[in-house]
């Protein structure tokens, strides 16, 4: 889920305006960070042939990384056929992992 944008409330004083502007400037760097618009795919099994994982982002994924793995298997990208719906991965040996996709 994407982080919601900062809504600058109306301010009656110059100090309030400056605070709202500074807060908006700070929040913008969070709003524009693609890592914050992702989800964890927990306990997915990645096999030795192409495994399509439904990422549920509602858009093409940008990147991914393994956040939990209890095996020495290597996980890598397969040929992507529908990045708007799936992340296609392959493993050197079948593995159950948690993947963060954004």
Image (cartoon, helix red, strand yellow):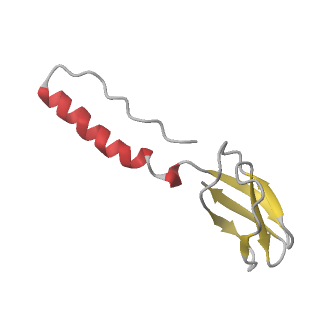
Report x, y in % for residue 90.
79, 70
In this view of the protein, which residue sits in the foreground, 70 or 47?
47
| Above or below for 41 versus 22 | below
Name the quadrant containing residue 24: top left
**What residue is at 81 percent from the left and 58 percent from the top?**
52
Left or right, 72 with reference to 15: right
Residue 12: x %, y % from top left: 17, 19
Count of numbered circles on the image: 0
Residue 5 higher or lower than 71, as above or below = above
> At 64% from the left edge and 54% from the top edge, which residue is drawn?
61
Question: Which quadrant does the C terminus fall into?
Answer: bottom right
Q: Is residue 31 left or right of residue 80?
A: left
In front here: 42 or 19? 19
**In the image, what residue occupies the spot 76% across and 69% down?**
78
Q: Position of residue 55 (x, y in %)?
A: 71, 50
Task: Give the residue furthest to the left.
Answer: 14
Q: Is residue 42 left or right of residue 1?
A: right
Q: Where, quadrant-wise, is the N terminus in this rendering? A: top right
Q: Can you give x and y, in whole percent of width and height, for residue 93 in the image?
A: 83, 77
Q: Between residues 78 and 10, which one lies in front from this camera angle?
A: 78
Give me the residue at 24% from left, 36% from top: 21
In this picture, residue 80 sits left or right of residue 23: right
Q: Compared with residue 22, is residue 48 higher up or lower down, i.e. above or below?
A: below
């Amino acid at each position: 889920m994407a982080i919601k944008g900062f809504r600058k409330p109306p301010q009656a004083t110059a100090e309030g305006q400056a605070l709202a502007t500074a807060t908006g400037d700070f929040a913008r760097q969070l709003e524009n960070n693609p890592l914050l618009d992702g989800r964890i795919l927990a306990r997915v099994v990645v096999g030795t042939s192409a495994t399509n994982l439904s990422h549920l982002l509602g858009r093409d994924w940008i990147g991914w990384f393994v956040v939990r793995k209890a095996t020495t298997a290597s996980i890598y990208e397969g040929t992507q056929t529908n990045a708007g719906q799936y992340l296609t991965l392959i493993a050197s040996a079948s593995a159950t992992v948690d993947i963060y996709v954004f």
